[in-house]
Structure formats: structure tokens, C-alpha cells
Image (spheres, rainbow, N blue to C red):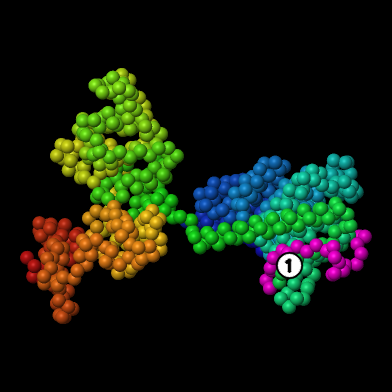
Amino acid sequence: MQLALAAGDLELARSLADEIQSISESLENGHSYYGLWHLLTRVKWLYRTDQAEAGVAIAMDALPRIERMVDRNLLERMKLLAAEGLGRLGRATEGANLMALAVSANPDPPLEMMAEASRVAGRLTAHDDPAAAASHFDRAARILHGVGNLTAHAEIQRDAREAAERTAVLHAVSTGSYDAGTLMVREDPPPHALTDRRPPAAALTERIAALVGLAAHPPLLAAESLSLIADTDASLHARIVATSPDGSHEVRAAVAAADAPAWRDDHPDTIALALGPHRDRQLHLLALPRPTATARATLLAVERLVQTALALARARHQEREQTALWPEPSPEQQLGLVCAAERMMELVKSVRRVAPSNVTVLITGETGVGKELFARALHQASARHDRVFLPFNCTTVPRDIIDSQLFGYRRGAFTGAHEDAPGLIRSAAGGTLFLDEIGEMSWEAQPKLLRFLESGEILPLGETRPQFVDVRIVAATNANLEQLVADGKFREDLYYRLNVIPLNVPPLRERREEIPLLVDHFLDKFSHELQKPLLRVAEETLEYLVLYRWPGNVRQLANEVRRMVAMAEPGAVLMPEHLSSAIAASRRTVPANQRTLEPTEMVMRLDQPLAAATEHLERALIRRALTMCDGKMDEAAKMLGLSRKGLYLKRQRLGIE
């Protein structure tokens, strides 16, 4: 269909459009990715067949779906097509606004997108300012010719002719020189109809923007610069020269004033601008200024513009390289977390999903796993990130004063209350209050916390009216709250109110793949903190750290690395000798016959046939499963990953009662 449009065969394009639509409607996902891309071609066909209103309707309807796909290239193309259609319907101002949105969303577009934006700008300005439209079309044509897209280049030329013909007809109608009966223009439009009616500053601004946008592509920058110099009439001669490695020169393009003398390669006043390499040649722009101060100053301004554009292009290139070599921080790094295990990555995703809401979150896990870090990550990823994050450990104050500590009190509410105290909840207003070790909260304070969680209101001691406070509560505990509820030490209704979103942080021994990352993180942190540069951890030492059980979890690992850094000399390699005695002793080899086996372990000899070893293993696994499930076949089969019949047959074969 694209080829038919390029060849001008609109009937073939029409039949292909019908066939494509029929295929798309018959497919389950026909209106997803490929269907949306096809709409670009369909809209162009509708414009070519004078169905601009239908084309605009399709383009505007597709924009929300494309936005959900997050395809920036497709979104910009469709917005530009919609803008063109609005111009075709006589709503050029609306089209220009939509075009501006499309272009602004992509500050570093590909060349063909820049050409498309210039083409649409030409369509939109054709009626108001034919000369400005011609400038836009010329720029689009130069870009497409430079990148070798001859099909799109032909489309630009067709659009330029169509816009010029439409402008001539409109001018003829306005001057009375249009014969409606014969559909002929009786006279050529006067020269002033093609004059640029924009202020000079507007035209100059577009030229500057074009130079900046094309600076990364030397051939296109050269063509744009040559065009700009020719339009200023400040030079007698200007030419683009390509220099090969052997020193030979090739003139790519040249312009000369009507009163210019013959070109001299050795003219002392010639200005040379280096535009950068293209393939195996260096491109230069040579210009001979007119012998006036004004002309020389004008060319100097062009020279500075070109140099600035080249500097900006180099900066963009360096930024892209830097991004490739040093990528943006990962989502977990942005939240201050060091994660690698699959369970931890899922936990980070949960944090990001939950963070925007105000629901209460309960973080559980052993001591030292990093529950406060996840609470801070929740706060950082939320809309409250610019407000206070206030941590409070419920075990740090006596149980009988935790009420006043949380909810505050008025002066004179009790003996010793000499002044008002806002309390932690009001101090964290607008932010996040992190209640650590929530299982240690006194029974008396629990009902007040429950009321606050349900209504957002607190009643400080001595106050007669409740006060509304906007605070998000994140709680954490290393205790088994369900057991505390069963023992009558924690309110059941408060437990369920806190446990709206449960997040469990696994212990370090269940995510050992993160230990090398954590060691590097803590080593870098404490090396800077203790001014011990160039420290490294030996592989043998890292093996000890990875295989240790870490009963104190991440906090214990951090303290171990801090201790090693403090004891080491600057530039040292941290060896197993630097480890604490408990960790160093954990890797001592013990003969199997002298080792006490765990309940989930067994010893198997390797000097036996495979069938015998397999039977030994199956027999042990089945007996353990039946014992743990109290002989219940369904539960044992589920534990072993077998069907009930499969377990029955294995028991028969092995003779297990």
C-alpha cells in the first residue's frame, strides 16, 4: 500500500486498504501493534483521497492507544499526521499546537522525524506564508535526500507543489482572477504573494533551530549552513568541500553572487568552517565575505552558530556514550536498596506498586534484614517523598509513656507536663511514620492507634476534641503477630488493620546471591567513611562470607565489613585472617561420620550402582513425607510432587508400609 501511494496509484492503494482492514479484523490482535502502525499509511491514503476529516478522526482515536504502548516514535508520527490533517481542515492553529507537542516530546529526534516535522510545518504554513512553507519543504527535502530516502523525498516535492497550487488558487479567488467555470487561474500570482511575511527574527529562529538539530550529521549541517549563508547575501562565494585522506578536494555544492569574481583557492579573506567527518572525508564550508564590515560580522555570527551547534552535538554524543557505559541507576538503586535475588526484586516491585497509595503496610522479617530500608523506600517512592520520614522504635520508651509519645499531650494534662507536646504522629504530618517493633506496643496504646488508622484522628492527652492528621503508617516487626494475637498480647482488630499490605523480607541466608553485592556496597561505604582507600576482598574471603549463616542478617554483615575495614591497612587485600573468629571457624572441614546431620540431611555413598542410590533416596524421601503428613497420602503426594496413584505405586515397589 505504501508503494502504491508512492507511485500515485490510488485505486490500488484503495483495494489494498480494504484487504488490510479485512485481515486485521479477522485477527485476534489485529488492532494492536501492527494495526496501529498500519493506521499511519491509512491516514496518508485518506489525505491523498481528500478524506481529511476521516483521516483526522482515525489519527486522534489512535493517539490514546499509542500512548499506552509507550512507543514514542509511533506517537510522534501519528501526532504529526493529525496536525497535518487539522491544517487540511482549515484548523492550522490547532494543528500547529499539536505539532509543537509532538516535537517538544522528543528533544533528540532521528533525521527522518525532523524531515517529517518540517514537512508538516510546510503544510500548516502554506496558506498564511507561502515563502515560510517553501523554506520548511526545502529543509525536509534536503534532509531526506541526505539520508537517501528518495520515496519520502518525492512525497515532499509533491506536497510542496500541492501547497503552491493551493496558495495560487486561494490568491486568485481573493483577487478575482479565478474562473470558477473553467477552474483556471487567469494570471500568475504577483511576486508579493510569495514574500515571507514573518518577522525576520522568526525566520532566523527557525534557521538556528535547524542548525542545532542537524549538527550531528555533517552533510546536512553543511547544506543547511550553505543555504543560510546564501540567504544572508553576505558572501560572494560559498561552497562545501570534502577533503580525502590523500589531500584531494571535491566540491559538493557551491553558490555565488551575481557580481562575484572568479573563485580563488588561495584568497586570503576566505573563511573555513570545519563541519566534521563524513565517511572517509572531512567536510569544510568555505565562504568569501563581501568587502564590508557588515558582511564580515554576519559570517562571523554564522560561524559561531555552527561551532555552538557542533559543541552541542558532541555533548549529546558523550552523554549517550556515558549512559551506555554507566547506565541509569536501577529501580532498586534509586530507592537506596541493594538487591539481586528474585524474591527481593519482586519485593521492590511490590514497594513501587504500593507506594503511591496511603494504605498501611506491615513489614515482617528477622532482626537485621533491612525492614527500615524498605520503609524508607516506600516513603521515597510515594508522593510524600519531599516530606518527613519519622522512624520510631516501640521498644525505646517505657510502655506506660508510649501513649503520650505517639499522640502528644497538652500542657497540664498530667504532673510534669509543663508545655504542649505534639507527639510523633503530628510531627510526621504529611509524611510517613515508621513504627518499628510494633509487637512491643503496650495493650493500652493499641486501641488509640487502631482508631487513628481507621479515622485519621487522634485525641492527645488533655484535649477535648479529636484532631485529623494526614500521616501514612508503615509498621514492622520481627515477632509472630499471629501468635501474639493467639496469646492475647496483641489486638486482633489492630493486627488486621496493620496487615493490609504485608511485605516479608527474607533473611540473608535465603538470598546469598546478594552477599557479594552487599560486601562491595559496604566496602565502598566504609572505605570512604574510615578513609581506607583501595581495599579489596579476596575471593577466598568472599567464599567464607557467602557460606556463613548470618544469624544477624544484613546488619551483622555490615558490622563485619566495617570491622575488617577498620583493622586493615589502606590498599590491603582483605584475607580470611581479617575475618572474626566465628566466621573463620565456620568453614572448618568436618568428616561426615563426625558431623551431626540436620533433620533434612542424609549421607549417601557414591561407590554403589545408580539404581541402588536412587532407591535409597526415594525410600528416604517417601518415609519422611509420610511421617510429616501423619500418613495422609494426599498431603504426602503433594509434598513430593506426585499424584496419589504415583505415590501408591512407588510404595508398592519399595515395600513401604
In this view, 164 is above or below 460: below
Classify the position of the N terminus by image quarter: bottom right
Residue drawn at the location 41% of the way across and 61% of the way down: 533
What is the three-letter code of the residue carrying label 1?
A: Leu
Tell me the element at label 1: strand
Residue 314 visible (yes or no): yes
> How packed is label 1: few (under 14 Cα within 10 Å), some, or many (20 or more)?
many
Apparent side of residue 441 relative to residue 328 in the rendered image (left or right) = left
- Percent across and percent down for residue 654 are 11, 71
The residue positioned 17% from the left and 78% from the top of the image is 606
Whether residue 145 is situated above or below residue 380 in the rendered picture: below
| Residue 448 position by quadrant | top left
At horizontal 91% and vertical 60% (from top left) the residue drawn is 258
Q: Is residue 265 magenta?
A: yes
Point out residue 35 in the picture as x, y percentages from the top left corner: 55, 56
Disc 1 target residue: 283
Q: Quadrant of the C terminus?
A: bottom left
Comparing 90 with 357, the one in front is: 357
Range of residues picked out in magenta: 258-280
Residue 580: image location, x then y, percent: 24, 61
- Residue 91 colored in magenta in the image: no
214 sits to left or right of 557: right
Q: Which one is in front, 599 or 548?
A: 548
- Quarter location, residue 36: bottom right
Work out whether residue 499 can be spotted.
no
Q: Position of residue 67 (x, y in %)?
A: 53, 49
